[in-house]
C-alpha cells in the first residue's frame, strides 16, 4: 500500500484516484463499541470450552451453551431493528474425519440482513465459535479461546448491532461458524449451502484473531492489521488458465480486489490503522474459514492482527519457566478489536450500499495506442440504483490502483492513448449516492460473477 499520514488517518497518495467521502461510514466507525466487544468476549470465555466435541446440553458450559447464547444475541439485535435479521442455525452431522471420528452435529449461527434493492447479492462477515487447547482432540479441558476466536465472534455481533440500524441495497450476513479447529466444517457447510441456494456472494470477510497486539517477537502494535487474499482463483478452468497466461490476472482475483477495497476503507475511515494486503491465501501453510468459500469460487479474505503470540494459541493453560500459556482474556486488547470490527463494518456497509460489481468485464486494445473496456448493463433490479461506472488502472508492479476516471452510465469506454500493455485495468460500479463496488479485473481471472 502506498499512503501518507494525514492527521490520524492514512489517505491514498495517488491524487489521480477520485473518491467521494461518505459521512455514514464515519458514523458507523464511531458507533463500534470496545466495551460491548469486551462484554461479549467475557461471556464467550465464561463457557469454559467451546470445543466442537464439547458439551451441548449444559446451559453454562460447552459449545451448545455458546451457540445458544450467540443466537439469542442475534435475536435480540433483530428485535431492536423490527425483525430486520433472519436468524437461524445451520448444521450438518460430520463423522469419519481425522478430528471428528464419531458423528457430531456441527452447528453455526447465521443472521441475514436482507437488502432492499438486490437481496440475492451478499457480503458476509464471519468469526469462529470453537476453541481448543494443545491437543486438538481434548474437548474437556478449559479452552477460553478469548482471542482465537471469541474476538472474531464478538466483532461479528458488534457489526450486526451497528449495521442493523441501517438499510442497504444488498444483503449482509453475520456468521458465527462452527468446527473451524476440527477442519473448517462450518465454512464448508455454509459455502456449499450458499452455492446450492444461488447466493451471489461478492465478499467474505473472515475474522480470525482480531484482538492481540503483543507478538511472540516482542512487538507491541495496535496500528496495523493484515488482510490475506489468494491470487489465482480455485475454480479456474484449463481455458481460464490459458487465457490468464496471455492477459494477466494473477494478482487481480476477486479476493485480491476485495482486499484492496478493505485496505482503502482503512485509509479513509479508520483512525490509526494501516492494513497490509498479503498475497497469500492465509498464513504460511495454515488455513481459515474463508478458504471453503474460495474453494467454490467466492471472493473471500482473512482479516486479523499483525503480530501473533503463539504462547496464546492452541495452548493448555499453564505456566512454564515464568511464561503463561493459554488464550485468556487478559491477552485481548478491546480497543484494537473494536478498530478491526469497525474496518469490517465500514467495508460491509460500503459494498452493500454500492451496486453489484460489474459483470462480463472485457478489455481490448492489442496493437493499439488506446484501451477499450466494456461490461454488461446492470440487472433490471439495479438500473435505478446505478449512477454509472469508474475505470481504474495502475502500473503492473503497483500494489493498488493509481488512476481512475468516472465514465458515466455507459457499458463501453475507450481510454485514449493509454496503452493496454503497460497497465492493469478494472471497472467499478457507482451508486446514485457515490458508493463504489470493488474493482473488477477483465475476464474470468477477475470476475465476481453475475
Image (cartoon, rainbow, N blue to C red):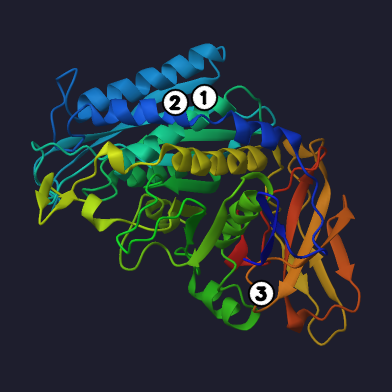
Q: Nearer the viewer, residue 118 or 181?
A: 181
Q: Residue beneath label 2, please?
A: 36
List x then y, in percent, for residue 394: 73, 72
Residue shown at the point (70%, 50%) measured from the top left: 7
Q: Is residue 360 left or right of residue 68?
A: right
Outermost residue, bottom side: 367
Counting residues from the start of the chain, the first of labels 1 and 3 encountered is: 1
Residue 174 pos. (x, y %)? 47, 33
Callout 3 crowding tier (Cα within 10 Å): few <14, some 14–19, many ≥20 = few
In the rendered image, the quadrant that contains the N terminus is bottom right
Relative horizontal placement of residue 89, taking residue 169 as reference (left or right): left
Q: Real-space Cα distance between discs 1 and 3?
A: 37 Å
Q: CA distance from mark 3 to mark 2?
A: 39 Å
- At 30% across and 25% down in the image, what residue appears? 43
Closest to the camera, between mark 1 and mark 2, is: 2
Find disc 3 in the rendering and name its residue. Answer: 398
Mark 3 or 2, which is nearer the eye? Answer: 2
Residue farthest right in this picture = 416
| Number of numbered labels in the structure image | 3
Relative vertical location of residue 5 with respect to residue 209 in this rendering, above or below = below
Amino acid at each position: 500500500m502506498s499512503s501518507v499520514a494525514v492527521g490520524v488517518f492514512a489517505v491514498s497518495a495517488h491524487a489521480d484516484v477520485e473518491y467521494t467521502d461518505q459521512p455514514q461510514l464515519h458514523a458507523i466507525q464511531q458507533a463500534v463499541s470496545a466495551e460491548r466487544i469486551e462484554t461479549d468476549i467475557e461471556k464467550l470465555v465464561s463457557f469454559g470450552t467451546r470445543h466442537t466435541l464439547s458439551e451441548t446440553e449444559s446451559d453454562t458450559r460447552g459449545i451448545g451453551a455458546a451457540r445458544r447464547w450467540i443466537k439469542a444475541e442475534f435475536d435480540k439485535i433483530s428485535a431492536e431493528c423490527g425483525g430486520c435479521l433472519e436468524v437461524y442455525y445451520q448444521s450438518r452431522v460430520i463423522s469419519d474425519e481425522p478430528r471428528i471420528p464419531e458423528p457430531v452435529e456441527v452447528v453455526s449461527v447465521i443472521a441475514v440482513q436482507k437488502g432492499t434493492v438486490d437481496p440475492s447479492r451478499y457480503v458476509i462477515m464471519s468469526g469462529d465459535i470453537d476453541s481448543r487447547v494443545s491437543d486438538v482432540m481434548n474437548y474437556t479441558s478449559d479452552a477460553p479461546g478469548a482471542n482465537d476466536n471469541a474476538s472474531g465472534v464478538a466483532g461479528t455481533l458488534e457489526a450486526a448491532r451497528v449495521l442493523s440500524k441501517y438499510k442497504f441495497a444488498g444483503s449482509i450476513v453475520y456468521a458465527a461458524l462452527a468446527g473451524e479447529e476440527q477442519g473448517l466444517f462450518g465454512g464448508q457447510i455454509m459455502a456449499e449451502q450458499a452455492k446450492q441456494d444461488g447466493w451471489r456472494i461478492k465478499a467474505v470477510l473472515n475474522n480470525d484473531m482480531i484482538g492481540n497486539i503483543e507478538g511472540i517477537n516482542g512487538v507491541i502494535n495496535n496500528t496495523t492489521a493484515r488482510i490475506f487474499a489468494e491470487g489465482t482463483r480455485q475454480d479456474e478452468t484449463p481455458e481460464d488458465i490459458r487465457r490468464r497466461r496471455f492477459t494477466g490476472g494473477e494478482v487481480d482475483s476477486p479476493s485480491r480486489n476485495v482486499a484492496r477495497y478493505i485496505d482503502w476503507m482503512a485509509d479513509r475511515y479508520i483512525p490509526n490503522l494501516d492494513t497490509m494486503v498479503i498475497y497469500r491465501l492465509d498464513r504460511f501453510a495454515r488455513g481459515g474459514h474463508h478458504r471453503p468459500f474460495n474453494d467454490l469460487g467466492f471472493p473471500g479474505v482473512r482479516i486479523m492482527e499483525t503480530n501473533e503470540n503463539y504462547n496464546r494459541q492452541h495452548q493448555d493453560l499453564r505456566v512454564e519457566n515464568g511464561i503463561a500459556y493459554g488464550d485468556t482474556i487478559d491477552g485481548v486488547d478491546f480497543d484494537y478489536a473494536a478498530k478491526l470490527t469497525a474496518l469490517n463494518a465500514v467495508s460491509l456497509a460500503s459494498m452493500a450500499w454500492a451496486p453489484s460489481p460489474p459483470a462480463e468485464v472485457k478489455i481490448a486494445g492489442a496493437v493499439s495506442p488506446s484501451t477499450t473496456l466494456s461490461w454488461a448493463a446492470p440487472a433490471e433490479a439495479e438500473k435505478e440504483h446505478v449512477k454509472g461506472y469508474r475505470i481504474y488502472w495502475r502500473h503492473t508492479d503497483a500494489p493498488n490502483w493509481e488512476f481512475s476516471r468516472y465514465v458515466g452510465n455507459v457499458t463501453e469506454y475507450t481510454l485514449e492513448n493509454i496503452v493496454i500493455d503497460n497497465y492493469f485495468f478494472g471497472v467499478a460500479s457507482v451508486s446514485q449516492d457515490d458508493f463504489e463496488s470493488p474493482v473488477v479485473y477483465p475476464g474470468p481471472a477477475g470476475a465476481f460473477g453475475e
